[in-house]
């Protein structure tokens, strides 16, 4: 009976050891899974740090580019304002020149009229030949005025 009892105890201890081994295997599997998760977490942290650095560098470049763009726009504004002022001055000078040209055109027209008037007043009367005197009615030609003046 002792043998049976010993056999039973041995059998029970083996049966109890089997769940311990099974629990031990589950524990080992869980530990392996935990290690894998820890490695993945470390890889994610490294990736996150790399992405964070890249974003910081990108922000720095964007800030620098924004500053360059802001300066370029300010320079363009100054240039446009200067050009606007220059265009205004040129427009005023063109207007002044147009007024002067109109004034000179009026003066030239007045001088032309004066010259024509003087030419008409100082022009000798047309000389008429014998044919021209016969063609004019009596008393209207220069000969008639000359005879009337002589009489």
Image: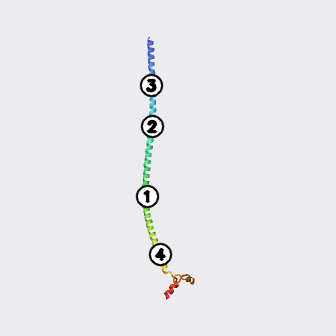
Query: For mark 3, does the 10 Å Cα neighbourhood hold few (<14), some (14 to 19), or many (20 or more) residues?
Result: few
Measured in 3D between alpha carbons, the distance from the residue under mark 2 to the one under mark 3, in whole angstroms, is 30 Å
Of 114 and 37, the residue lying toward us: 114
Circle 3 is placed at which residue position?
24
Quadrant showing the N terminus: top left
Q: Earlier in the sequence, mark 2 or mark 3?
A: 3
* Camera-side mark, 2 or 1: 1
Instruction: Kindly check if marks 2 and 4 are in contact, taking CB atoms under 8 A apart as contact.
Output: no
Measured in 3D between alpha carbons, the distance from the residue under mark 4 to the one under mark 3, in whole angstroms, is 129 Å
**Residue 112 picture location, percent across and down:** 48, 75
Q: Secondary structure at mark 1?
A: helix
Of 118 and 128, the residue lying toward us: 128
Circle 1 is placed at which residue position?
80
Query: For mark 1, does the 10 Å Cα neighbourhood hold few (<14), some (14 to 19), or many (20 or more) residues?
Result: few
Q: Residue furthest right?
A: 131
The residue drawn where x is 43% and y is 50% is 66
Instruction: Kindly check if marks 1 and 3 are in contact, taking CB atoms under 8 A apart as contact.
Output: no
Q: Is residue 143 above or below residue 43?
A: below
**Residue 111 picture location, percent across and down:** 46, 75
Measured in 3D between alpha carbons, the distance from the residue under mark 2 to the one under mark 1, in whole angstroms, is 52 Å
The residue drawn where x is 46% and y is 35% is 40
Of 129 and 123, the residue lying toward us: 129
Query: For mark 2, does the 10 Å Cα neighbourhood hold few (<14), some (14 to 19), or many (20 or more) residues?
Result: few
The residue drawn where x is 42% and y is 56% is 77
**Residue 115 picture location, percent across and down:** 48, 77
* Camera-side mark, 2 or 3: 2
Q: Secondary structure at mark 2?
A: helix
Q: Earlier in the sequence, mark 2 or mark 1?
A: 2
Q: Which mark is residue 113?
A: 4
Q: Which mark is residue 44?
A: 2
Q: Decide if residue 144 is on the left or right side of residue 92.
A: right
């Amino acid at each position: 009976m002792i043998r049976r009892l010993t056999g039973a105890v041995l059998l029970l201890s083996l049966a109890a050891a089997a769940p311990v081994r099974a629990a031990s295997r589950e524990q080992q599997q869980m530990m392996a899974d935990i290690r894998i998760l820890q490695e993945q977490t470390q890889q994610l942290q490294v990736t996150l740090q790399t992405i964070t650095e890249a974003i910081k560098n990108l922000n720095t470049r964007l800030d620098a580019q924004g500053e360059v763009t802001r300066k370029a726009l300010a320079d363009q504004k100054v240039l446009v304002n200067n050009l606007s002022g220059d265009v205004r001055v040129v427009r005023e000078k063109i207007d002044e020149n147009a007024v002067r040209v109109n004034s000179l055109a009026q003066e030239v027209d007045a001088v032309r009229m004066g010259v024509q008037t003087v030419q008409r007043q100082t022009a000798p009367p047309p000389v008429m030949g014998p044919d021209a005197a016969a063609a004019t009615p009596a008393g209207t030609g220069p000969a008639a005025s000359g005879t009337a003046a002589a009489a």
